[in-house]
Image: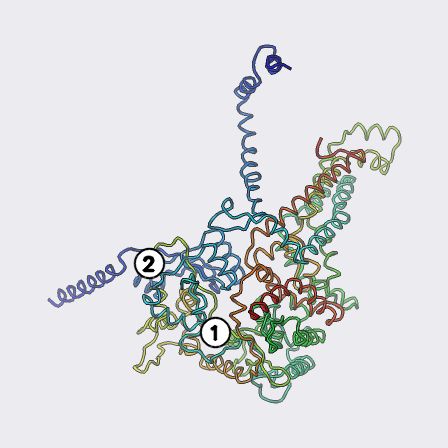
Amino acid sequence: MSTVVKKQKARNPLGESWGRRTLNAMRAHWQIYIIILLPIVWYAIFAYMPMAGLQLAFKKYMPRRGIWGSPWVSFKNFQNVFIDPAFLRSVWRTLSINILRLVFVFPFPIILALLLNEMRAKRYKSVLQTVMTFPNFLSWVIVSSILTNVLSADGLANSFIRMLGGSTVDFLGSEKLFQPMLYITDIWKSSGWSMIVYLAAISGIDQDQYEASEIDGANHWQKLLHITIPNLMPTIIVMFILATGNLMSAGFDQIFNLSNSATKNVAEILDMYIYRITFQSAPDYGLSTAISLMRSVVNMALLLLADRGSKLMGGNGLFA
Amino acid sequence: MKKLLSLALVMIMLLSFAVSASAEYDKHLTISWTEVIEQDEGNDYTQDAIYKTFADKFNVDFDIRPLTWGNWTTNVNLYINGLNLPDATNWFFNYTDYANYVEQEVLYKLPSDWQERWPGAAEVYRKTGLAGVLEDENGDIYCLPVPVYFNNKPVEKMPTHLQIYARKDWIEQVTGEPVHTHYTFSELADLCRKLKAANPAGVENFYPFTSYTNMLIQGLVYSGYEHVSSNYDIYLGSDGQYHWGPGDEQTYNALKFVQDMWKEGLIAPEFYTLNQGEDEDLMTIAHSSAMFYAGGLAANYILFTNEQLSSGLNPDESLCSFFVTDDEGVYHSAEATNYFGALIFNPDLDDEKFERIMDIVEYALSVEGQDLIFLGVEGTDFTKNEDGTYNMLHEYTTSDLYVSNRFFCTLAARADDFSIINPSFLAKATAKQKEQYVEKSSLIKDSLGELDFNYIFHTSDAKTRLGSIQAAYVDDYANLITKEGDLRANWEAWCADKMGMVQPVLDEMNALIAK
């Protein structure tokens, strides 16, 4: 194709170039462009510019020389990562905790939303919704101190168990009970909040579908199975894909606050490992960045995998 | 006429003071200073006489940035790596980090003639044990170790000061004899058993021994073997080879002893959930425990005495302290360093400010400075006799009267040194501080894990990596104690797991001594 034809293609019938048209459009709608500029600047400063720091994964960080001036060390930081067996254990532990979190915790807000949607007493429903949302606003520091008091040997739970004739249960120091405790507390704290997304999706379902099904004689269960859940599916899939993309990084606040030396063997997830090697001994920013980079790459791979899986099963993905 | 004369005299005095002050320190400086301040509580340190004396004498103001024990190491490391160090910072010194930071040029280099210019500070530096080993190939140093003892060192080679504080009345009640100055491990277990059976507190959940994780491990496990803690874990054995202490049988025995006590219900079952201070509260305030581990300093003894008093007890009858030996009566301990932390300075500090800081340090280490910091204002709080002894003019301690004491008491040196002779302290407490060092030393038979500077000052990638597992020793030992299953199998698995990180360091050290 000749240059003349290319130029012609880039012009509209009025003879204006693409650049001029864009400029004219920006002039005409400058308010909208100003609004969109803010998030673009935010992303550029806080999300993309810090990525330059990822080069530390391949450098020996020297504060005096800064990130750009520190010497390159090739893949030495990555080699060092694999020398410590605690690293690989923390990776598998992170994956296992978060996969089980997907199995046990992820469905809860969906179930809650479906149940709440079926409630007819509107006032009671809104009270219940508020009560269930409230724990989300408590920090894990608060939740863990409450739990420590409730679940300790002299706490409420054990007093109740002893009152019923049982013997004291070591809730706080048991390695076997640690992960179930994570899932239960996560469900208690976050389900109410996550439920809001699904409730919003349910409220957006076309009411004509329900009316039509009623005319056809469908009962509550059939409406749930054949209208509500299928309409909710795209939201569930998007939330699932997002959760999958976080498999390697979720849960630091919770585990950091709920774990102790008795449960450390089942609690050291990747974030805890990074925290330990970064802050509890001489900080090695190159090593920490190398681990963080690996984690991000795995998270991205999982995200793409979940997205691809969703599309293969006929659902919608995150990316077109 | 008299009034005019008085006025003239006052004017002359003020002028002479102003001239002398301006001659030495004509420029007012604000010095930012970071250190751990216990019981900070957002205090204003700038209003009392101790602060004003320092501020006027050196024409400075202090921008005090207090840290807690919990965030001390982390924050200072972040300040260093972020090139954001305050002018002076008390940093948790360790040689691996020091060498690393010196190489990275993030610490201020002291001038080569500093020892001549500040002879008092230089003399104290020589007493820390680090003189001659901190210097680089040019003889330069980049930090000033904060001394523990420099005028009143109780013994030549110091063991740890940690000891057990206990309910004296309960122990005497169940044993029928006066409290000992030390018990063997078996005697301690028996004592706890008797206390558990008698339950002198009369509460449902009474546990004879309660300490939070760090103190329990540092107290009981470290008393079982001198090579279990970091810096003392890699040691030169009698065979001329380097070994790893946590993998030695003695470590297993120490862990086994604590685990047996814990399983028997003699130690609080959930010690791992306790925070610092909660353990002592259980004995001194809640009265549901009979003993706990804590630092053996006079100030601690006074603190617990006061807590006993406030809960209606007579501390003379209800408070005692002792330590634990092995069943042969031998005391095991790592040698305590005669420094705790080090002063480091912003690498871009100007010379004038550095010199002012060093003048302050020099004064704080002098007899006059120590008197001011720990006893208050001469003539108001104390007087001094010609023989150097003191007369206190009231019954209060300096920290009761001057909140800035909390900042100055660790500014250039630890408070341990003056505690030994502090006349404002309870005489029993100061005596206890000294006696326990002397007695522990007398019971050490080749069981002091001595500082091996060849190892401490060795730097390599392998040693840096080892640092991450050493930092977790306390938690790992606690985990082994509470872990289900056979302790020996668990301990052996733990050792095997760590050997991948330990062996390269052992190989390096053995190669070094082979040269």
Identified by mark 1, the residue type is: Ala
Q: Which mark is residue B60?
A: 2
Q: Is residue A22 visible?
A: yes
Confirm whether residue B292 shows in the render: no
Chain letter for mark 1: B
Tag of residue B299: 1
> Is B407 positioned to the left or the right of A35 in the image?
left
Based on the displayed image, in which of its 4 quarters is residue B470 positioned? bottom right
SS of the residue under disc 2: strand
Residue located farthest toward the bottom when viewing the structure as drawn? B177
* In contact (CB < 8 Å): disc 1 and disc 2: no
Question: What's the amino acid at mark 2?
Answer: Val
- The alpha-carbon separation of the residues under discs 1 and 2 comes to 30 Å
Chain containing mark 2: B
Q: How was the colour assigned to the protein in this rendering?
A: rainbow
Label 1 sits on a secondary structure element that is helix
